[in-house]
Image (tube, rainbow, N blue to C red):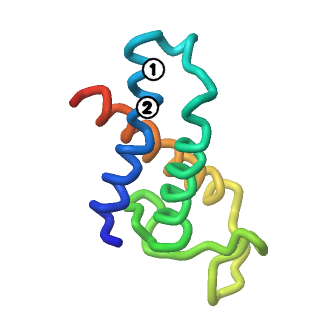
Amino acid sequence: MTRSQMLATMDSLMGGRAAEELIFGTEMVTSGASSDLKQATTIATHMVKDLGMSDRVGLRTFDDNTGQLINTGEALGQSTKEAIDGEIKRLLQVRVCVCVCV
């Protein structure tokens, strides 16, 4: 799957939540889109941690089980962990914005 295809999949997954925000406001978003959010989060995490598809985090892969860089065994610093988490959040937020702006 290409980066564009992954982003498009995330767009369709986040569309329901974005629609609820537009119609009902952020305070009235329901739990109905929770499985879509989980799937979109999984895709974003895979892009950042496994596929190196983040300009902000870079071309690396990260091991969830050990908290280390794959193949080097180098432990991840707190700032790297925060950068990974921030990039996953950013990808999800951008996808919601894309849905709202369409």
Residue 47 % position (x, y): 46, 64
Label 1 SS: helix
- Residue 68 is drawn in which quadrant? bottom right
- Residue 14 is drawn in which quadrant? top left
User: Disc 1 marks which amino acid?
Assistant: Glu
Residue nearer the viewer, 99 or 77:
99
Residue pointed to by mark 1: 20
Residue 57 % position (x, y): 48, 62
Residue at position x 37%, y 53% in the image: 9
Residue nearer the viewer, 15 or 88:
15
Taking the image as shown, residue 84 lies to the left or right of residue 90, namely right
The quarter of the image holding the N terminus is: bottom left
Residue 67 % position (x, y): 74, 69
C-alpha distance separating marks 2 and 1: 6 Å
Residue at position x 61%, y 59% in the image: 80
How many C-alpha atoms fall within 10 Å of the one at disc 2: few (<14), some, or many (≥20)? some
- The reply to whether the C-beta atoms of the residues labelled 2 and 1 are less than 8 Å apart is yes
Residue 26 % position (x, y): 51, 15
Residue located farthest toward the front when viewing the structure as drawn: 32
Say the numbered circle drawn on residue 76. none
Residue pointed to by mark 2: 16
Residue nearer the viewer, 102 or 60:
102
Task: Decide: is 72 above or below 64.
Answer: below
Task: Decide: is 90 above or below 42.
Answer: above
Label 2 SS: helix
User: Disc 2 marks which amino acid?
Assistant: Gly
Residue at position x 36%, y 44% in the image: 12
Residue at position x 56%, y 57% in the image: 42
The quarter of the image holding the C terminus is: top left
Residue located farthest toward the right when viewing the structure as drawn: 66
Task: Decide: is 82 above or below 17.
Answer: below
